[in-house]
């Protein structure tokens, strides 16, 4: 793309560089470039072997289109620092740390190899081990230079929000009530509908969200939303983990239920209404499993793939195998991976025009 130099008042000239920055800062430019900005091209498997900070941390990338994958491996480095631990992801951005216990955080864009070190957070250092961070970036509603990081300290009942526009952390004013926070799992926050959402698992689990749109980050509150339907116990020996995430502009929750056959598992997909009134049932998927071997399935991700955004894949991770399941066609494709991480999680690889 060529950007012409244009004359401005006073006889000065705006350079091509400043014109380009002004262009990509316009949210409408993002939509014109890609009307489906959160289309995933691949999935990133964090690879954090047990070998100390000096061990390699090259993450495994599984592409949707194996004929022309965007990446095969991913080594995230900011200068000389290897970012081994991926804390969160959102629409092409990754929140990374050298290790899970390290207090330093970088926002990284794998597609452009950009990294931004966040300033030190001002929580009580006695409770830093309990901090839970979630990344938020909205390519439709925000400027490409705007992103936020929500950091919750469950022990103190407080949250701080980092804004790239301000370049600093803003501590939320009043502490959250204990009755609001109890039962909420803050380890995985999901951005959707202008808010970051958390879900709790188990008998006493609770779901909550925090609206982060707007300028006053010190006035955010934690709101409770309905719990997803409970897991229906099954006699099936296969272990299936719940999934909670965003796909195609929808907040989704997947749990498993009774199956009519011991050679299959049933997965129920639920979605949250935008007014937070309820989780509603969307559809059920019966996934066959190989009864001849010991295997477990973990619902890792549900994404839209393909230019028409019709093909929806449910990714199930077994022992060294990723199963791509096409919900529309009912077909399977197994991909073997060499990943030493014990964390059964993956992150979408998304191209973005965001700048950090």
Image (cartoon, rainbow, N blue to C red):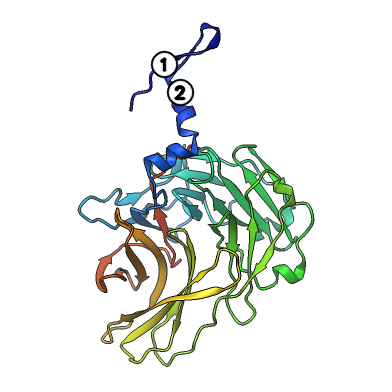
Left or right for 37, reference 124: left
Q: Residue at x 42, y 52 (%)?
A: 38
- Decide: few, some or many residues near mark 2? Use Cα within 10 Å; few <14, some 14-19, many ≥20: some
Quarter of the image for residue 33 reads top left
Identify residue for label 1: 5
> Residue furthest toward the right?
174
Residue 19: numbered disc: 2
- Measured as percent of width and height from the top left, residue 155 is found at 73, 63
Relative to 91, is 248 above or below? below
Q: Residue at x 61, y 64 (%)?
A: 186
Secondary structure under tag 1 reads loop
- The answer to whether mark 1 and mark 2 are in CB contact below 8 A is yes
Q: Nearer the viewer, residue 56 or 129?
A: 129
Relative to 309, is 115 above or below? above
Q: Nearer the viewer, residue 7 or 315?
A: 7
Q: Quadrant of the N terminus?
A: top left
Q: Residue at x 53, y 44 (%)?
A: 106
């Amino acid at each position: 793309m060529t950007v012409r130099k244009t004359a401005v008042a006073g006889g000065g000239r705006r350079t091509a560089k400043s014109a380009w920055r002004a262009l990509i800062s316009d949210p409408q430019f993002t939509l014109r470039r890609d009307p489906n900005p959160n289309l995933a091209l691949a999935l990133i498997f964090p690879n954090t072997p047990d070998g100390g900070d000096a061990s390699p941390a090259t993450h495994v990338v599984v592409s949707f289109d194996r004929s022309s994958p965007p990446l095969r491996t991913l080594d995230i480095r900011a200068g000389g620092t290897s970012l081994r631990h991926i804390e969160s992801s959102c629409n092409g951005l990754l929140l990374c740390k050298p290790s899970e216990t390290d207090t330093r955080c970088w926002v990284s864009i794998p597609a452009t190899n950009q990294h931004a070190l966040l300033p030190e957070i001002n929580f009580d250092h006695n409770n830093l081990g309990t901090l839970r961070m979630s990344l938020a970036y909205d390519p439709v509603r925000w400027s490409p230079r705007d992103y936020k990081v929500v950091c919750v300290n469950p022990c103190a009942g407080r949250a701080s929000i980092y804004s790239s526009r301000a370049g600093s952390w803003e501590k939320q004013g009043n502490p959250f009530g204990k009755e609001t926070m109890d039962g909420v799992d803050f380890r995985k926050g999901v951005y959707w509908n202008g808010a970051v959402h958390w879900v709790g698992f188990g008998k006493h689990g609770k779901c909550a969200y925090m609206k982060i749109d707007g300028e006053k980050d010190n006035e955010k509150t934690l709101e409770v939303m309905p719990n997803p339907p409970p897991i229906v116990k099954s006699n099936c020996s296969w272990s299936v983990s719940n999934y909670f995430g965003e796909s195609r502009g929808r907040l989704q929750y997947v749990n498993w239920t009774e199956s009519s056959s011991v050679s299959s598992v049933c997965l129920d997909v639920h979605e949250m209404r935008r007014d937070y009134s309820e989780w509603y049932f969307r559809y059920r998927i019966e996934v066959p499993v190989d009864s001849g071997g010991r295997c477990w399935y973990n619902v890792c991700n549900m994404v839209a793939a393909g230019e028409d955004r019709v093909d929806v894949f449910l990714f199930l991770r077994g022992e060294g195998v990723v199963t791509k399941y096409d919900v529309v066609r009912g077909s399977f494709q197994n991909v073997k991976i060499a990943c030493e991480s014990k964390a059964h999680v993956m992150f979408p690889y998304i191209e973005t025009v965001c700048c950090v």
